[in-house]
Image (tube, grey):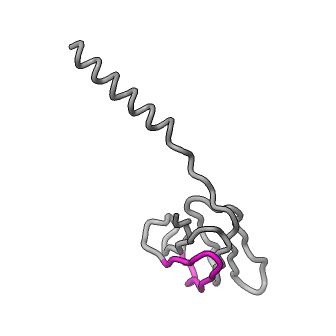
């Protein structure tokens, strides 16, 4: 019984150290700009991080970040997508869904 408790405490301590020592996710420097229509302002996402839902009328996405951006067909970034390299843009189909940062 004593060995079992020692093993459990050791495993819990190691897990806690791994969780505490993992660095936090950093947002990417720059912005992603999305053009929808001529009748509205462009949408700008500064230092995007995680999965971001695109406007429903999104037409063109321009990646001005320091990392690649992936355009997904669903709003949860679960499906494979098209990668847009830094400094480039891409047409996005209407109702594309979302984009995420590719590290």
Residue at position x 70%, y 81% in the image: 35
Q: Which image quadrant: the N terminus? A: top left
Magenta span dominant secondary structure: loop
Q: Is residue 57 magenta?
A: no
Residue 4, x across and y down, in percent: 23, 19
Residue at position x 49%, y 66% in the image: 77
Q: Quadrant of residue 52?
A: bottom right
Q: Indicate whether 66 appears above or below 94.
A: above
Q: Is residue 92 magenta?
A: yes
Q: Quadrant of residue 18?
A: top left
Number of marks present in the image shown: 0
Q: Quadrant of residue 31?
A: bottom right
- Name, please, the residue furthest toward the top: 2
Q: Indicate whether 57 appears above or below 13.
A: below
Residue at position x 43%, y 70% in the image: 79
On the question of residue 58 being in view, the answer is: no
The magenta region covers: 82-96
Q: Indicate whether 14 appears above or below 87.
A: above
**33 or 13, which lies in front?**
13
**46 or 73, which lies in front?**
46
**32 or 26, which lies in front?**
26
Residue 39, x across and y down, in percent: 78, 84
Q: Indicate whether 90 appears above or below 26.
A: below
On the question of residue 28 being in view, the answer is: yes
Residue 97, x across and y down, in percent: 54, 72
Residue 7, x across and y down, in percent: 27, 23
């Amino acid at each position: 019984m004593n060995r079992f408790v020692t093993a459990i405490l050791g495993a819990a301590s190691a897990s806690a150290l791994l969780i505490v020592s993992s660095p936090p996710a950093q947002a990417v420097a720059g912005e992603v700009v999305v053009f929808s229509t001529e009748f509205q302002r462009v949408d700008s996402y500064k230092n995007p991080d995680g999965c971001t839902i695109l406007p429903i009328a999104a037409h063109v996405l321009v990646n001005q970040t320091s990392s690649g951006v992936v355009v997904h067909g669903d709003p949860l970034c679960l499906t494979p997508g098209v990668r847009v390299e830094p400094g480039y843009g891409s047409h996005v189909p209407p109702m594309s869904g979302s984009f995420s940062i590719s590290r």
